[in-house]
Amino acid sequence: MYGTRLFDRPEHAEVRLGLLGFVAGPGPLGLEIGFDHGMCVLDRARCFPTIRQLGVELREARVQAAATNAPDNCLLLRMDGRTLVTALLPDASVDWLYILFPTPPSSPKRALLTPAFARSVERVLRPGGSLWFATDRPELADLVDQLFRWPVAAAPPPLGSQLSRRERVCRRDEIPVFRRCLSRPAALVGAR
Ligand SMILES: C[S@@+](CC[C@H](N)C(=O)[O-])C[C@H]1O[C@@H](n2cnc3c(N)ncnc32)[C@H](O)[C@@H]1O
């Protein structure tokens, strides 16, 4: 599923080891899925030097360009976020998950926000960790509400001052933005 076996292959072992080494490092860890140009993830890495920031993005050119500007506390990889949370990240390894304006799926096969993804997010987020989500598509906000029946977090996760590209467009064109900031409970009830 989503190329989850890909990183078992010897040619990708280095990426996997580098990722796991970074994730095992000291201090809290933020994860952004679909960072595009990387404005937000890079900005958070610079604003909060004691927090490690991991970012994954499908578009290779974007990853290469952003990675050249990444400080030591930031690892940016070309990887499917579904592969990362389903198969690669250890349990309870992430403190904050940022999903900003995910691509509306063109087919079920490409969908990020699925029950399987939500179960994996539950696994990799620490109890008390949070999901920071924004979209200008109300149906995607509704989907997050269905998939993550979690309480609203008491406080937002660490945020820098940069807006993502899509958020700038929304602000410029006065498009409404729907946000969620949800806290992963210590105990999860019920199966999907
Ligand atoms: C609509 S853009 C939004 C980008 C940025 N977060 C923003 O707010 O402007 C969605 C981004 O997510 C990336 N993406 C889509 N599905 C992904 C996945 N499964 N894993 C990682 N990145 C993904 C796309 O390549 C694209 O850059």
Image (cartoon, rainbow, N blue to C red):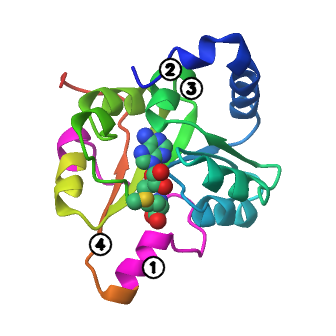
Q: Amino acid at mark 3?
A: Leu
How many residues crowd around disc 4 within 10 Å: few (fewer than 14), some, or many (20 or more)? some
Task: Give the percent coordinates (x, y) of residue 157.
Answer: 51, 57
**154 lies left or right of 38:** left
Label 1 vs label 4, nearer the camera: 1
Answer left or right for 54 relative to 87: right
Give the residue at mark 3. Answer: 89
Can residue 52 be seen in the rendering of this structure? yes
Q: Earlier in the sequence, mark 3 or mark 1?
A: 3
Please tell me in which quadrant of the rendered image residue 167 appears: bottom left
Question: Reading the chain from its start, which is encountered first: label 1 or label 2?
Answer: 2
Q: Along the polypeptide, which appears first: circle 4 or circle 2? A: 2
The amino acid marked with disc number 1 is Arg
**Distance from Cα at disc 1 to Cα at disc 2:** 33 Å
Predominant secondary structure, magenta span = loop
Numbered marks: total: 4
- Residue 6 shown left or right of residue 187 in the figure: right
Tell me if residue 56 comes above or below residue 177 in the rendering. above
Q: Which residue is mark 2?
A: 87
First reached walking from the N terminus: tag 3 or tag 4: 3
Question: How far apart are labels 3 and 2 at the CA level?
Answer: 6 Å
Q: Nearer the viewer, residue 117 or 155?
A: 117
* Callout 3 secondary element: loop
The stretch in magenta equals 145-171
- Reading the image, the residue beneath label 1 is 168
Task: Say which amino acid is labelled 4.
Answer: Val
Q: Secondary structure at mark 1?
A: helix
Mark nearer the N terminus (1 vs 4): 1
